[in-house]
Amino acid sequence: MTTGAHTIGLARCTTFRDRIFNDTNIDKSFAKSLQQICPKTGNDSALAGLDLKTLFSFDKFYYMNLLKKKGLLHSDQELFNGGSADLL
C-alpha cells in the first residue's frame, strides 16, 4: 500500500526516463507524452509532475492515475501492478 508521499511535487527526467521507455505497465499515450519532454538522451533536468492533474494538491488523483497505469515513478506504479493489494 502506498502512503501518498509522491502525490505532490515534481520529478526530474533522470528518475523516470527508464520507466517511460522500457516499462510495460505504463499507459502508452502517457509514456509518449512524457517522451516529448524527456527524450532517451539529454534534457536530464526536465521536470514532470508526480500527479499531472493536480500538481500541488494532496488528493485522490495520484491514486487514480496509478490505477490507469499513469504513475510517473516505477516504484509507485509497482504498488498497483495487478496484485491483490491493489484493491486495499
Image: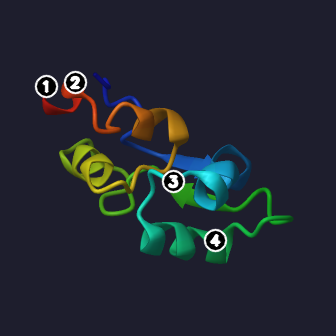
The residue positioned 28% from the left and 22% from the top of the image is 1
Q: Is mark 3 on a helix, strand or loop?
A: loop
Residue type marked 1:
Leu
Quadrant of the rendered image containing residue 17 = bottom right
The foreground one among 71 and 12 is 71
Q: First in sequence: mark 3 or mark 2?
A: 3
Q: How far apart are marks 3 and 4 (CA)?
A: 15 Å
The foreground one among 58 and 16 is 16
Q: Residues within 10 Å of mark 2 (few under 14, many from 20)?
A: few
Task: From the viewer's perspective, tell me whether residue 47 is left or right of residue 51.
Answer: right
Q: Name the residue under label 4.
A: 35
Task: From the viewer's perspective, tell me whether residue 73 is left or right of residue 3.
Answer: right
* Residue 12 makes an appearance in the image: no
Circles 2, 1 touching at the beta carbon (< 8 Å): yes
Q: How crowded is mark 3: few (under 14 residues within 10 Å), some or many (20 or more)?
A: few
Q: Distance between the residues labelled 3 and 2?
A: 19 Å
Q: Name the residue under label 1.
A: 88
Q: Distance between the residues labelled 3 and 1?
A: 23 Å
Q: Is mark 1 on a helix, strand or loop?
A: loop
Q: Distance between the residues labelled 1 and 4?
A: 31 Å
Query: Could you say where residue 56 lies in the image, as x and y percent from the top left?
Result: 36, 51
Q: Mark 2 points at which residue?
A: 85
Q: Distance between the residues labelled 2 and 1?
A: 5 Å
Q: How crowded is mark 4: few (under 14 residues within 10 Å), some or many (20 or more)?
A: some
* 11 in relation to 87, above or below: below
Query: Could you say where residue 36 lies in the image, as x and y percent from the top left?
Result: 64, 77
Q: Name the residue under label 3.
A: 24
* 87 in relation to 10, above or below: above
The residue positioned 79% from the left and 57% from the top of the image is 44
Q: First in sequence: mark 2 or mark 4?
A: 4
Query: Could you say where residue 88 lies in the image, as x and y percent from the top left?
Result: 13, 25
